[in-house]
Image: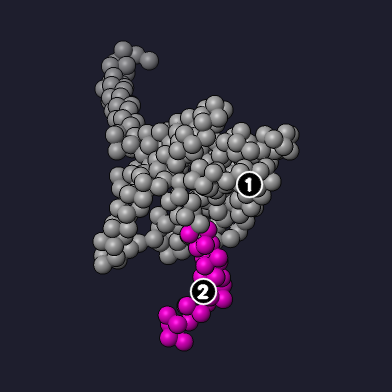
Amino acid sequence: MSDAEQSANLPAKRERRRSRARQIVAARLEKLEDLSISKLVPSTLTLLGLCSGATAIRYAVMEQWQIAVTCVVFAMIFDVLDGRAARMLGADTRFGAQLDSLADLVSFGVAPGVIMYTWSLSRMGTPGWIAALIFCACSAIRLARFNVQSVRDEGASKSNPYFTGLPTPAAACMMLLPMLISFQWDGALVREPWVAGTMIAITSALMVSRLPTPSVKHMRLSREHRFLAGLCGGILVMLLVIWPWATLTIGLLIYVATIPVAVVVHHPAAKHERTALHHGK
């Protein structure tokens, strides 16, 4: 190639280099936008929940079970807050969803299993440990199914506010119910390994089942009911401060009572009847 031809191609080469540089800068700016505070807040809350679950395992090994259960409760609070923050800030991402599921597996699958094992199931030896592993495995299956349903838009929504199977946070609470009872009323019977094993069998089966369970986060209150809900929330917080274990126990029993109601409401025959009434048939 002659010097004249090389000189003629120089402007085109410079333009290509500038275009490439602009693309690189734009890509880096896009990455910086992905690291904005609004998108970091939900993930930070998720990680705090993960740390709470891991701390629960530590205190369970130290046989400080009330602190361990309290850490699981804090993990539940962070689990609620990270979802709310993601929706409010428009920061719903696939990364956040996967991180949330991993945190849930630790906080509501592994931690409750270890807590129940150290508190009661260890007296059964290897069968007790196998029971704890079954709970962890069913938690992983439940979360994997939830992720698949979320990708396919088959999960709970405003029009269908029901999960498929018992959510892992609710399962963790149900499985720890004997401990909550013992904290409040000092019952020796509820600490028997067969009680813990029964609770694990029930909660594990519910997690991997197809039963519909209520999804509170997709339920919307009308304006006239918001004040009442706020008042009830304030009373609930006060009761948690005064009688934490009794309040958690009663609240959990109320939630369990809603599951049969959800099954009836979600039943195909009931849905068909409501649709017919809606259309005036």
The picture quadrant where one finds residue 165 is bottom right
Amino acid type at image mark 2: Lys
Percent across and percent down for residue 170 are 51, 50
Q: Is residue 269 magenta?
A: yes
Colouring chosen for the image of the structure: one colour
Residue position marked by numbered label 1 in the rendering: 189
Q: Main secondary structure of the magenta part?
A: helix
Q: Is residue 263 left or right of residue 129?
A: left
Above or below — where is 200 with respect to 58? below
Query: Taking the image as drawn, is residue 102 in sight?
Result: no
Give the spatial CA distance, label 1 vs label 2. 42 Å
Residue at image position (32%, 18%) is 5
Residue at image position (47%, 78%) is 275
In front here: 236 or 164?
Answer: 236
Percent across and percent down for residue 120 are 63, 38
The picture quadrant where one finds residue 51 is top left
In front here: 4 or 111?
Answer: 111
In front here: 212 or 16?
Answer: 212
| Residue count near mark 1 (Cα–Cα under 10 Å), binned few <14, some 14–19, many ≥20 | few
Residue at image position (49%, 36%) is 66
| Residue count near mark 2 (Cα–Cα under 10 Å), binned few <14, some 14–19, many ≥20 | few
Residue at image position (61%, 46%) is 190
